[in-house]
Image (tube, rainbow, N blue to C red):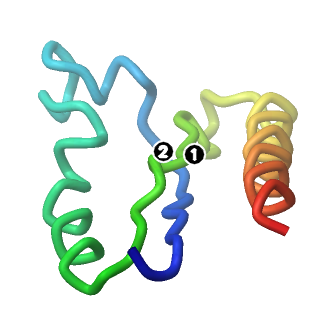
């Protein structure tokens, strides 16, 4: 395999939204499968995706909780990158 690829992103929906019974009726990985195939076709070492849920800010959300989730996501990304260095 060639270069490693880390696909990192956030969703506005909750973890429940990305379940068989949720709003999207599929887990996040189901939406990523076509991309995974393309990355592998291009010779990239596809690492497991890193994603965080419930990052949307709305009148019903607590901005501080969203910020905490965002900072945790950032730390997780940094830890993975540091493992490669």
Residue drawn at point x = 23 percent, y = 68 percent: 35
Left or right, 68 with reference to 46: right
Q: Earlier in the sequence, mark 2 or mark 1?
A: 2
22 is higher (above) or lower (below) than 66: above
Left or right, 45 with reference to 5: left
Which quadrant is home to the C terminus? bottom right
Indicate the secondary structure of the residue bearing disc 2.
Answer: loop
Crowd class of label 1 (few under 14; some 14 to 19; many from 20; radius 10 Å):
some
Residue 8 point in image, percent of width and height? 56, 59
65 is higher (above) or lower (below) than 43: above
- Please report contact status of discs 2 and 1: CB closer than 8 Å, yes or no: yes
17 is higher (above) or lower (below) than 1: above
Left or right, 30 with reference to 29: left
Task: Name the residue carrying label 2.
Answer: 12
Residue drawn at point x = 20 percent, y = 51 percent: 31
Which quadrant is home to the N terminus? bottom left
Residue 69 point in image, percent of width and height? 75, 35
Crowd class of label 2 (few under 14; some 14 to 19; many from 20; radius 10 Å):
few
For residue 56, which numbered disc appears in the image?
A: 1
Left or right, 10 with reference to 41: right
Residue 30 point in image, percent of width and height? 17, 43
Residue drawn at point x = 24 percent, y = 21 percent: 19
């Amino acid at each position: 395999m060639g270069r490693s690829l880390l696909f990192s992103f956030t969703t506005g929906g909750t973890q429940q939204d990305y379940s068989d019974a949720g709003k999207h009726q599929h887990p996040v990985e189901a939406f990523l499968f076509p991309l995974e195939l393309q990355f592998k076709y291009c010779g990239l070492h596809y690492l497991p995706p890193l994603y965080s849920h419930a990052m949307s800010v709305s009148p019903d959300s607590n901005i501080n909780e969203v910020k905490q989730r965002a900072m945790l996501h950032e730390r997780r990304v940094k830890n993975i990158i540091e493992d490669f260095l």
